[in-house]
C-alpha cells in the first residue's frame, strides 16, 4: 500500500518550515532524483536505511546492476528532508512519532557542479 506523508509533512512544516531547504519524494528517479534540484553541491548518502528484501529479489531476478538499481528505485528510502544538521534529530523524532522508520542517511557538501555518492554494502556509486 502507498503511504501518505501528509501528517508528517504537516508537522514538519509547522515546526521547521524556515529551516527546510528541500523535500524529495524518491519516486520516478530513485535515489538520484535529488540531482534535479541541486547546483554546486555533492550529496553523500552513506548511512542508508536497510534494504527491503524486494529490491534484492529484483536485482537477482532481473540481473540489474546495483548502480542502476539506485537510479531507478527508492531502495527503501521514500522521503528525504534537507535541512541544517542541528535539526535532523527533530525530523527523525517527528517521523518516528508517526511510526515511520527514519534516520539521517547522509549529508550535503559544497562542490563544483552537482554530484551524488552512494555508499552501501553493494558498493560505492558516483553519479
Image (cartoon, grey):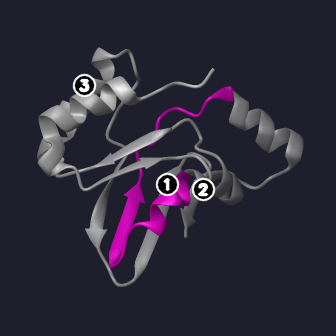
Task: Name the N-terminal-most of marks 3 and 2.
Answer: 2
User: From where the camera sits, is residue 51 visible?
Assistant: yes
For label 1, the SS is strand
Can you identify the residue that label 2 sits on? 29
Q: Is residue 35 above or below residue 10?
A: below
Label 3: how many residues lie within 10 Å, few (<14), some (14-19) or many (20+)? some
Judged by depth in the image, the label closer to the viewer, 3 or 1, is 3
Query: Distance from label 2 to label 1 (Cα)?
Result: 18 Å
The front one of 32 and 13 is 13
Task: Name the N-terminal-most of marks 2 and 1.
Answer: 2
Can you identify the residue that label 3 sits on? 94
Residue 86 in the image, given as x and y percentages of width and height: 11, 45
Query: Distance from label 3 to label 2 (Cα)?
Result: 25 Å
Residue 58 in the image, given as x and y percentages of width and height: 79, 39
Q: Is residue 29 above or below residue 56?
A: below
Query: Distance from label 3 to label 1 (Cα)?
Result: 26 Å
Q: Is residue 88 above or below residue 36?
A: above
- The disc placed on residue 17 is none
User: From where the camera sits, is residue 89 visible?
Assistant: no
The front one of 124 and 94 is 94
**Mark 3 in CB contact with mark 2 (< 8 angstroms):** no
Task: Name the N-terminal-most of marks 3 and 1.
Answer: 3
In the image, is residue 96 part of the stretch drawn in magenta? no
- The disc placed on residue 119 is 1
Rendered-image quadrant of the C terminus: bottom right
The magenta region covers 31-53
Amino acid at each position: 500500500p502507498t503511504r501518505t506523508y501528509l501528517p508528517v509533512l504537516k508537522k514538519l512544516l509547522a515546526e521547521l518550515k524556515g529551516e527546510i531547504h528541500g523535500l524529495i519524494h524518491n519516486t520516478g528517479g530513485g535515489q538520484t532524483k535529488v540531482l534535479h534540484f541541486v547546483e554546486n553541491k555533492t550529496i553523500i548518502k552513506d548511512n542508508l536505511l536497510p534494504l527491503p528484501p524486494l529490491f534484492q529479489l529484483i536485482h537477482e531476478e532481473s540481473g540489474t546492476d546495483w548502480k542502476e538499481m539506485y537510479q531507478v528505485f527508492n531502495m527503501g528510502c521514500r522521503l528525504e528532508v534537507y535541512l541544517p544538521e542541528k535539526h535532523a534529530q527533530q525530523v527523525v523524532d517527528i517521523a518516528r512519532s508517526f511510526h515511520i522508520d527514519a534516520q539521517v542517511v547522509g549529508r550535503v557538501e559544497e562542490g563544483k557542479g552537482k554530484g551524488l555518492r552512494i555508499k552501501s554494502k553493494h558498493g560505492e556509486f558516483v553519479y
